[in-house]
Amino acid sequence: MNTKIKIVALLGALAVGIGAFGAHGLKPYLDLSQTETFRTATLYHFVHILPMMFIALMPSKSKVANLSFYLFFAGTLCFSGSLYLLSTKHLLGGDAWNFVGPITPVGGLLFILGWLNLWRIEK
């Protein structure tokens, strides 16, 4: 199995596990705003697994596609990861996690760059 498929499999398993934990295990500990932030993180986490899997299964070894794969991967870590932390920071030590706030838009930018980069793929 290639490395990209392993990365996607791990991200997929994490998305399901983290999403379920957020919906059930964290429910009593999150307010409405925190719950919405956690859901947004999970949604973007799941959504970006799909193009990553598509790229991982592509028969060609396109450098352009590979770049998008890693942009989506980094975007997931930065965007969803920071939102997971920000929505639960009150459980993890409070304001000590505020430094991850500026990472969220970096993750969003990485997602955008990943999508725009796909424009460059040729047949």
Image (tube, helix red, strand yellow):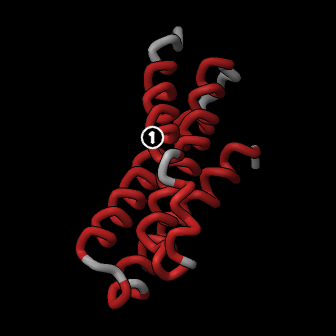
Percent coordinates x, y for residue 86 in the rendering: 46, 64
x 57%, y 28%: residue: 68
Q: Position of residue 27 (x, y in %)?
A: 34, 85
* Side of 41 where 8 appears, left or right: right
Q: Left or right: where does residue 78 sit relative to residue 10?
A: left
- Vertical placement of 53 versus 80: above or below? above
From the viewer's perspective, is residue 31 above or below residue 60?
below
The percent coordinates of residue 14 (x first, y second) are 56, 66
Q: Mark 1 = which residue? A: 105
Tell which of 39 and 91 is nearer to you. 91
Amino acid on which disc 1 is placed: Pro
Location of residue 61 (image quadrant):
top right
Is 62 above or below relative to 44? above
> Count the marks: how many?
1
Q: Quadrant of residue 52?
A: top right
The structure residue drawn at horizontal position 54% and vertical position 55%, both measured from the top left corner, is 100
Residue at image location 33% in from the left, 64% down from the top: 39
Residue drawn at x 51%, y 66% is 85
Residue at disc 1, secondary structure: helix
Q: Residues within 10 Å of mark 1 (few under 14, many from 20)?
A: some
